[in-house]
Amino acid sequence: MERGHYSPMDQDAFGSTEKPFAVGPDPKYLYRSASHGSVFDRLHDAVRRREGFVLVTGDIGSGKTMVCRAVLEQVDRKTFTSLVDAPASQEDLLRTILQDFGLASRDELKRGRLAHASARELLTTLEDFLTSLSSLGAAALLVVDDAEEVPLETLDEISALSGPAGGKDQVLQIVLVGQPILKALLKSPLVRELDGRIATRLELKPLTAEETPEYVSHRLMVAGMGPAADFTPAAMPAVHRYSGGVPRLINMLCDGAMTAVKGQGTDSITPEVIDTAAARLELRPTRSSSSSPWIRKPAVLVAAGLVLATSIAAAYVSLGYRDSGVNIEAASRLPASTAGTSAAASPGGAPTPAPSPQEPAPPAATTAAATGPTFSVLVASFRQANEATALMNELRERGLPVREIRVVQSPRGPWHQVLVGPYADAAAAARGQERVRQMRGYADAHVISG
């Protein structure tokens, strides 16, 4: 058998019984780059000191979950831990925590005594447990992953779980983990108190061009393959160029490259092999090491769950989620004759469909928005403009104040966002959100600023 052969069913052809570039967050593969090593150390120290709230941000695929899992493996025996992935509601959050802390089994939560328990009953169970920890000198650690996808009101409820700010008996420590846009979401008036309670803020950076080959070598060695002999030195710049130093994309590229040489009678992975793997993944070279490539996500995304490159996220925040003339958020305002030349034009110059003349004008709150903070409900995001238009029409038929389709550009193409609002205050936005969530398939609609 050729040494270059590699497939999920025969991984030992490269000298290992496991895939060195699996994308799952396995802590044993943690590579301590300058950024990852620093974030791990500081997070571990914050957990050890039992700081109330910690924020960890980084682009998708940067290794946030892996770092957190690695830290969780290091906690002492007196610390109960729970890792929750983007809970949609307070009930979901509490049920997961109770199960992780060992207070309830999955069967109890699904069919037993807690199957139909209210949020208040679940919270009482958790509070009683946390109170008992104080006398034992024990503590609890809650990590909320993909926190940018959590509704703002649920984030506010998470804050309440740890008790009043400045309290002496805060045995529950909370780590919020998410993409960079989470930092902007935490500035919303709905969760301003939570933002003020964050004691440590950490951010993961992509790997540098120098760290990328070391990362590849590290993964191969942990998998039992020894030095990265199969990757030629010339291939490493190509790996970094296509991945932007994002660990998940490095894994995908290298895994694809090792698969590509299957049956070719060679054990050398050259730049050409990397080019082939990148083409299959639809990755484009990044302009610089600080740029992050676009990574695919499902067509319907929740408010802050859009996967944006760092530069796109920065622009998204700087716009303040407000419409201001012709920009990437309001391409649908343009006449069809000019939309093809705007920044929000669809690939190939196809204009984004404009609202029909019969559509009602935005509510009066839109005019007042320029003088104070406003709120909207992000219902869904679509790759195809016609899908967004169909949803927009359905929302109008239900009497909801629909905004223009907001188009957000990315290196992989535009996303067409459907929003309801704007609303002058958070309470009105919350009522609009509840109306949207009553629609089948849109339970993840979120309130956002702007």
Image (cartoon, helix red, strand yellow):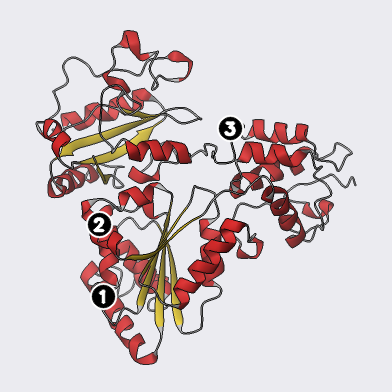
Secondary structure beneath disc 3? loop
Q: Amino acid at mark 1?
A: Gly
> Is label 3 in contact with label 2 (beta carbons under 8 Å)?
no
Q: Which residue is mark 2?
A: 191
Residue 73 % position (x, y): 56, 73
Secondary structure beneath disc 1? loop
Closest to the camera, between mark 2 and mark 1, is: 1
Q: Check the picture and name the quadrant holding the C terminus.
A: top left
Q: Residues within 10 Å of mark 2 (few under 14, many from 20)?
A: some
- Image position of 382 with respect to 131: above or below: above
Q: Which residue is mark 3?
A: 287
Q: Does any portion of residue 37 appear in the rendered image?
A: yes
Q: Residues within 10 Å of mark 1 (few under 14, many from 20)?
A: few
Q: Which residue is mark 1?
A: 166
**Left or right placement of residue 19 versus residue 331 in this view:** right
| Residue drawn at (58%, 32%) of the image | 287
Q: Does any portion of residue 118 appear in the rendered image?
A: no
Residue 184 % position (x, y): 33, 48
| Residue drawn at (41%, 41%) of the image | 306
**Left or right placement of residue 279 versus residue 176 in this view:** right
| Residue drawn at (32%, 18%) of the image | 353
Q: Amino acid at mark 3?
A: Arg
Distance from disc 3 to disc 2, alpha carbons, whole Å, reads 36 Å
> Is label 2 in contact with label 1 (beta carbons under 8 Å)?
no
Q: Earlier in the sequence, mark 2 or mark 1?
A: 1
